[in-house]
Image (spheres, rainbow, N blue to C red):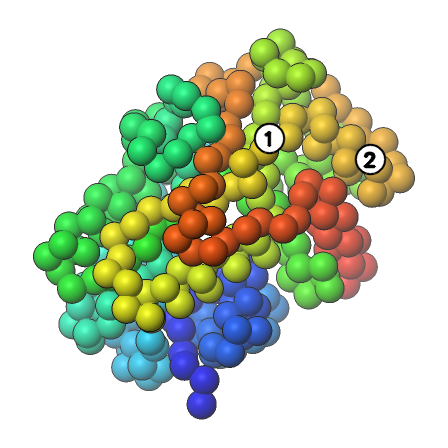
């Protein structure tokens, strides 16, 4: 029987793609999810264990039932804007939920833990590209909840019997090329699906927040990374821990290259054959002109090489949204 891996938030966007890659790598992913944001239809490569990361009893039940070799932790509230309005919920779920999972793991002697973190822990960039040594000074509650868990993991790695690897995402995008799973949030706040919805006529226009940045075309530049490349990194991180690595490391997950808002809209128009209506709006407070990852540490330690570009992300996401609309 293949080794089980408990994937908290495994019915969500990135979690479900990680389950796909785990299954392809010979593991049995167990999607642990309360389905508040995840989708049961996304659980296709292993069992669904309904539960809430805030419940110690739920987590211990799952650990006892499946005896996983490790845990990959995605379960979290993720919308930056909402984190200002729902501060208590974000801390309860993102920090409290992670600590509940970790305490249950300690009680059961499960050590490998791969943590879904974010470049939002860095805050305003002091230099680019951002490497793992960049100061961490998040500017929103979401980023602060993720940094708080990172800090707890450092202490648990040194003194608590947990062997963690922290993965800091840049901008996840794209979908399974076969159209089985993809990105759909409610509300949707991510740039690529919003652009696709605008091209499909499901929303009036794509809002461009600022066109006077010091970039190639005046619009903000971000490092988009394909969701399957992200999923691959989680499998590599888990394998590193299962092979005996002490853990405690953090790695940036980005391509190392930036894409402007205008370039993103151009790719959606190209793959769809449709215009993407847009409207210019003022800059948003806290938006950096450029955010680009230095991914050399992940390449060296994990052997991770992102292999898909923005054209792949736009094509795969367009295919997913087209199929999902017809379903």
Q: Position of residue 131 (x, y in %)?
A: 39, 34
Q: SS of the residue at dot 2? A: helix
Q: Position of residue 124 (x, y in %)?
A: 39, 22
Q: Is residue 50 above or below residue 94?
A: below
Total label count? 2
Residue 326 seen in the figure: yes
* Residue on which the image places disc 2: 269
Q: SS of the residue at dot 1? A: loop
Dots 1, 2 in contact, CB < 8 A = no
Q: Quadrant of residue 41?
A: bottom right
Q: Quadrant of residue 158?
A: bottom left
Q: Which residue is at 30% across, 50% downward?
A: 249
Which of pointers 1 and 2 lies earlier in the amino acid sequence? 1
* Residue on which the image places disc 1: 258
Question: Image check: 65 left or right of 276?
Answer: left
Q: Nearer the viewer, residue 277 or 231?
A: 231
Distance from Cα at disc 1 to Cα at disc 2 = 19 Å
């Amino acid at each position: 029987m293949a080794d089980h891996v408990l994937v908290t938030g495994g019915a969500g966007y990135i979690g479900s793609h990680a389950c796909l890659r785990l299954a392809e790598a010979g593991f049995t992913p167990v999607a642990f999810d309360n389905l508040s944001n995840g989708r049961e239809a996304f659980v296709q490569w292993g069992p669904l264990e309904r539960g809430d990361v805030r419940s110690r009893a739920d987590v211990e039940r799952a650990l006892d039932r499946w005896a996983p070799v490790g845990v990959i932790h995605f379960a979290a509230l993720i919308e930056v804007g909402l984190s200002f309005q729902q501060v208590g919920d974000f801390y309860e779920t993102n920090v409290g939920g992670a600590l509940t999972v970790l305490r249950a793991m300690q009680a059961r002697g499960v050590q490998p833990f791969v943590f879904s973190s974010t470049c939002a822990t860095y805050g305003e960039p002091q230099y680019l590209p951002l490497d793992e040594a960049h100061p961490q000074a998040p500017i929103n509650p979401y980023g602060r909840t993720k940094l708080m868990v990172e800090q707890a993991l450092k202490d648990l790695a040194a003194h608590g019997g947990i062997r963690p690897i922290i993965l800091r995402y840049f901008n996840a995008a794209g979908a399974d090329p076969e159209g089985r799973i993809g990105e759909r949030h409610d509300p949707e706040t991510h740039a690529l699906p919003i652009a696709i919805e605008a091209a499909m006529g499901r929303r009036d226009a794509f809002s461009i927040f600022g066109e006077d940045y010091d970039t190639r075309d005046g619009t903000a530049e971000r490092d988009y990374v394909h969701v399957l490349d992200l999923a691959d990194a989680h499998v590599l991180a888990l394998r590193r821990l299962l092979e005996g690595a002490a853990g405690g490391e953090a790695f940036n997950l980005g391509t190392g290259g930036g894409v402007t808002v205008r370039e993103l809209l151009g790719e959606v128009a190209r793959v769809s054959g449709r215009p993407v209506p847009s409207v210019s709006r003022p800059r948003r407070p806290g938006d950096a002109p450029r955010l680009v990852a230095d991914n050399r540490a992940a390449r060296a330690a994990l052997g991770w090489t992102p292999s898909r570009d923005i054209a792949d992300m736009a094509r795969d996401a367009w295919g997913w949204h087209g199929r999902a609309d017809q379903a």
